[in-house]
Image (tube, grey):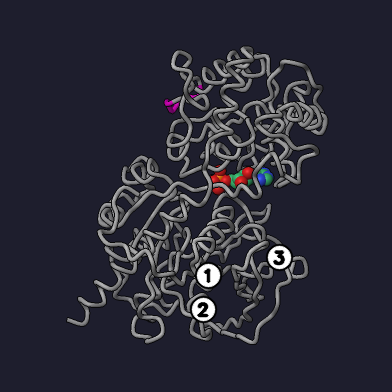
Amino acid sequence: MERRLSKPQKQKKLKILIAASEVVPFAKTGGLADVTGALPKALRSLGHDVRVVMPFYRQIDRIKYCIKQTEKKISINIALVDHPAIIHEGFLPDSDVPVYFIDCKSFFDREEIYRTSRGEYWDNNERFMYFSKAVIEMIRVSDWVPEVINCNDWHTGLIPVFLKTIYAFDPALKDIAAVYSIHNIAYQGFASKDMISHAGLPWDIFNMHQLEFYGGINYMKGGIVFSDAINTVSEKYKEEIKTPEYSYYLEGVLAARDKDLFGILNGIDYTSWDPATDKCLPVNYTPENMAPKEEIKKKLLGEFGLKYYENVPVIGMVSRLDQQKGLDFIETIIEEMMKLNLQFVVLGTGEEHYHRLFRELTARYPEKLGVSLKFDNSTAHNIYAGSDMFLMPSRFEPCGLGQLISLKYGTVPIVRETGGLADTIKQYDFKAKKGNGFTFQGYNPWDLFRAIHVATDTYKNKSVWERLQQAGMKENFSWDIAAAKYVELYYLAIHNKNLKNTEKSV
Ligand code: ADP
């Protein structure tokens, strides 16, 4: 964070509740879960009393994670129907960070988290409105009250709204500060204005400065407007989302909160992502002993039905398959890319169009392209380790974790200069011998093609390549640095909240 509180009360340890729709290792569809699984542990090691709350989805393994049912029960009325829930309790693995699970059968006992192959669940708006209210009701029946709630993405955007409206005068809750973290502004949670009544919110917040958004309501807008401090997950993305090109119509809302908006780059949990200790790999390696990386490459290629050729670089990709991730760029250049001396290994799920495309392409290029259309953690680890380069040509990227992970695995990233990718990956400068990857700027598939060309050419020069790998492996994107910045943000939120409370009482 560039701006700081003038006098942070750093000595005091905080009570922090992190609310999220997904948390590693219990449920994950993307980077949000990595963050909410790792940040609490880093905050805990700074001495704070941090806890996590998430929905109790059917897929969460209660035996494996020793999750216990508590006596605490809540019931919330949404659209005239009562939905009861029981609170369960566990811990983030290998830590003493408590995790609360909201067990509401009608909303969370489902096949998947957000969507099945038939599409999004029709009632996701109700599900996460429910979750947001349930987090607050859970605090009301608990003897532990946080000083700060850190809400994450649209799913929890209504927590600050509830706190500042219907719960504003509850003596147990009135001092809780809210921090809102934007992990991806493209997903905002739009709902019809009827949801105001369904949630029991007051109609006076249905106006363009608060919850209203083009005739309906917008959960993320609510989070931004009603929180005491806001952050997103890189400095560059923080600047980008203030422009119409990236903001998905929220630039004005963010402009109004500019002085409380910060960028904090995500970290990586090196206890899960380290080639020296990674349990998903057949063999481990270190910067001093890179030979096993080639073994992993051979095995990886075998698993994707490809032959190993010495000195042919493998480009890996682990990604949601959608436009945000630059899949349309890849679609445009793939024919030319397949003419280069390389192999391409892709792990991903997403839009049906790209599933079909990759199925067709693997049939046409069986020697060069290997694809797995799944969400599979172990395969992801083996791609980070077994590839020579990692591809992330995103149109926009709030932070991006794949490029940070691949650096640690000595797998050189090829990225578009946007958001967190621009903040972390610097084009290799052949003269100065500096940089950690290959980048391109344009919103143009052929700029991506050129970057791939340069990377595969550079790969031929073994000493340059080793220098690039070593530079990446030495970088440190651990959570300690980011967690300290989050603590500053929490103090700022408490400070802002206290100011508002004082203004109200004057
Ligand atoms: P996103 O926008 O999807 O959150 P990030 O780069 O922030 O992108 O984080 C994506 C996370 O999800 C990374 O940990 C990545 O390894 C993981 N991931 C993405 N797709 C898959 C998949 N198909 N299988 C396993 N892990 C995946």
Q: Cβ–Cβ below 8 Å for labels 1 and 3? A: no
Magenta region: 441-445
**Is residue 353 positioned above or below 34 on the image?**
above
What is the spatial separation of the Cα atoms under label 1 and label 3, in whole angstroms? 21 Å
**Residue 117 picture location, percent across and down:** 68, 52
Q: Quadrant of the C terminus?
A: bottom left
Residue that label 2 marks: 78
Q: Amino acid at mark 2?
A: Ile
Task: Judge the density around disc 1: few (<14), some (14-19), many (≥20) Cα neighbours within 10 Å.
Answer: some
**Is residue 299 positioned above or below 9 on the image?**
above
Magenta: predominant secondary structure element?
Answer: loop
Q: Is residue 467 magenta?
A: no
Q: Amino acid at mark 1?
A: Glu
Circle 3 or circle 2, nearest the eye? 3
From the viewer's perspective, is 343 left or right of 144? right
403 or 307: nearer the viewer:
403
In the figure, residue 86 lies in which quadrant? Answer: bottom right
Residue that label 1 marks: 126
The disc, 3 or 2, on the residue closer to the chain's N-terminal end is: 3
Count numbered badges in the picture: 3
Question: Which residue is found at the position 71% from the left and 17% from the top?
Answer: 312
| Label ID, residue 60 | 3
Question: Which residue is found at the position 68% from the left and 20% from the top?
Answer: 313
Residue at mark 3: C-beta within 8 A of ligand 1: no
| Callout 3: SS | loop
What is the spatial separation of the Cα atoms under label 3 and label 2, in whole angstroms? 25 Å
Task: Judge the density around disc 3: few (<14), some (14-19), many (≥20) Cα neighbours within 10 Å.
Answer: some
**Residue 125 picture location, percent across and down:** 51, 65
What is the spatial separation of the Cα atoms under label 1 and label 2, in whole angstroms? 7 Å
The disc, 1 or 2, on the residue closer to the chain's N-terminal end is: 2
Question: Which residue is found at the position 51% from the left and 35% from the top?
Answer: 394
